Image (tube, coloured by chain):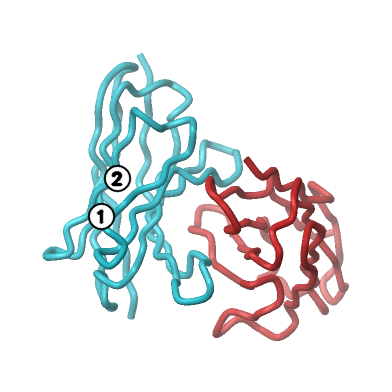
Chain colours: A cyan, B red
Amino acid sequence: EVQLAESGGGFVQPGGSLRLSCAASGFSFSDHYMDWVRQAPGKGLDWVGRTRNKANGYTTEYAAAVKGRYTISRDDSTNSVFLEMNSLKTEDTAVYYCARVRGGSSWQLDNWGQGTLVTVSS
Amino acid sequence: DIQMTQSPSTLSAFVGDSVTITCRASQTITDSLAWYQQRPGKAPKVLMYRSSSLESGVPSRFSGSGSGTEFTLAISGLQPDDFATYYCQQYHSYPVTFGQGTKVEIK
């Protein structure tokens, strides 16, 4: 069974930093791209970014709103993906989900974690 | 960026009704579209991919269609579990973008 579990959320002041982790199990983690998606309270889904797999150089993509402030990385030896968030703003307050990208010829997010809440406030 | 616009934003229906949600892309995305269902307090769950392919384990009362810029998600015979918020997502080009969501409510 595919499982994704986020951790590291919490309360942080504007301008601060936080590092989220996502532990994966139940599938060949190294083969898959992984995404981060966030959802502000009462709002819709907002794609944050993606890390590709080793075969594609572990390259990353980001949404414009977080580019330069957020960094996605992964450790295939521990089946983990990370989201390093710097220069946090109040508008970054959201539940952050990690999600597996199906891959192959289809690119839907086929498994999601339960999410971790990040609150940015003074 | 490709903008995804869903309509309606809210939809009220009875159990047993058939409903349709529309998603329009600001430029062509071929069939690079997925649909997700999200119940309150839960993570999203994928329903459809490549516009019309049903994700494994999803009931056949869900169906998707469309290509290019206009897409639909249809639910035939709404069940109590189907009252939720639905999102479309394009993965044709970066950045990946979602529609704003359609909430399906019980009438």
For residue A45, side relative to residue A25 (left or right):
right
Question: What type is the residue that disc 1 sits on?
Answer: Val
User: CB atoms at circles 1 and 2 under 8 Å apart?
Assistant: yes
Q: For the residues marked 1 and 2, what is the alpha-carbon distance in whole angstroms?
A: 7 Å
Where is residue B83 drawn, in percent x and y? 71, 63
Judging depth in this view, the residue of A120 and A98 nearest the camera is A98
Foreground residue, B101 or A79?
A79
Q: Which mark is residue A72?
A: 2
The numbered mark at residue B4 is none
The residue located at (76%, 46%) in the rendering is B26
Disc with the residue nearer the chain's start (1 vs 2) = 2
Callout 2 crowding tier (Cα within 10 Å): few <14, some 14–19, many ≥20: many
Q: Are marks 1 and 2 on the same chain?
A: yes
As helix, strand or loop, the secondary structure at mark 1 comes to: strand
Q: Chain of mark 2?
A: A
Looking at the rendered image, the quarter that the N terminus of chain A falls into is bottom left
